[in-house]
Amino acid sequence: MPYAGLTERTLRCRSGVFERTVWSLAPRTGRPAAAILFLDAELYLQRVGAAAVVRRLQERRAIPPAVAVFLSGGGAAARHQDFVCRPEYARFVATDLVGSVREKDPGVTEIVLAGLSLSGLAAAYAATRHPVVFRAAVCQSPSFWWERGRFAEELPAATPAGPEFWISVGSRETEAGVSHLPSGLRQELTQVAGCVSAAAALRARGYSVSYREYDGAHDPECWRDDLSLALPSVWGEDDRPRRGEAASGGFGAADVATRNDSLG
């Protein structure tokens, strides 16, 4: 991957089901006490430019000196199998990937999981099924439309450990009634409708959720800008409920303002 400082390795799960390439970007100084795990490495590195975003935020001290870890999506077919709320994949991320990160950097205590589109759905699923492992999940244009919103219908209740959620979506993500290659995965809900429903369901189950609806589409440039807001937010000291605190039933004041502005 074309970014200075990235190291590459192969990760195999204990069960032998998954084998993926992993790229890592260590902080320039110090030993990391936190990690950001990006699913969909190829999209995040090649199209979003996430490595540069992380470096820039660390230079501004907007986020801690975390190690950024990018897990390969494994190709188009694998994405349609692994990212749709698959328990085995969530376990692979929460145990094998996280275990390998902590083996290299034993000081890592806080982990943020990030995904976009289908991998945003996968990030949310893994975080709710392994809440002790992840501090927060950053879900950019997550595909909560999968199986007509099944994710929102099957949520476990929040635990004292969290995690927190950042959910963002473009106001122009209004496509529905379409099938996605290569598997023909059917989308009957719009991205926006799925995200609104999932955010409400997460709050109802006790999770802390920051929801952002921006003026844009399903676009890597939008995700790049959004990531610059999302990562500082999940580590920020603001008035949102923190880990283990119940969230309010509706959108917070800042969230409502963001939605109204983006909807014109």
Image: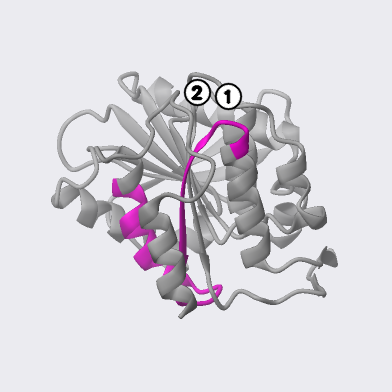
Pointer 2: residues within 10 angstroms few (<14), some, or many (20+)? some
Residue 258 located left or right of residue 246? left
- The residue at 61%/57% (across/down) is 196
Scheme of colours in the image: one colour
Q: Amino acid at mark 1?
A: Thr
- The residue at 48%/35% (across/down) is 247
Q: Position of residue 14 (x, y in %)?
A: 67, 23
Q: Are marks 2 and 1 in contact (CB under 8 Å)?
A: yes
Query: Could you tell me if residue 119 is visible in this image?
Result: yes
Q: Position of residue 241 (x, y in %)?
A: 38, 34
Q: Amino acid at mark 2?
A: Gly
Residue 161 located left or right of residue 156? left
Residue 99, label in figure: 2
Q: Which span of residues is magenta-colored?
A: 204-232
Residue 95, label in figure: 1
Q: Position of residue 6 (x, y in %)?
A: 34, 50
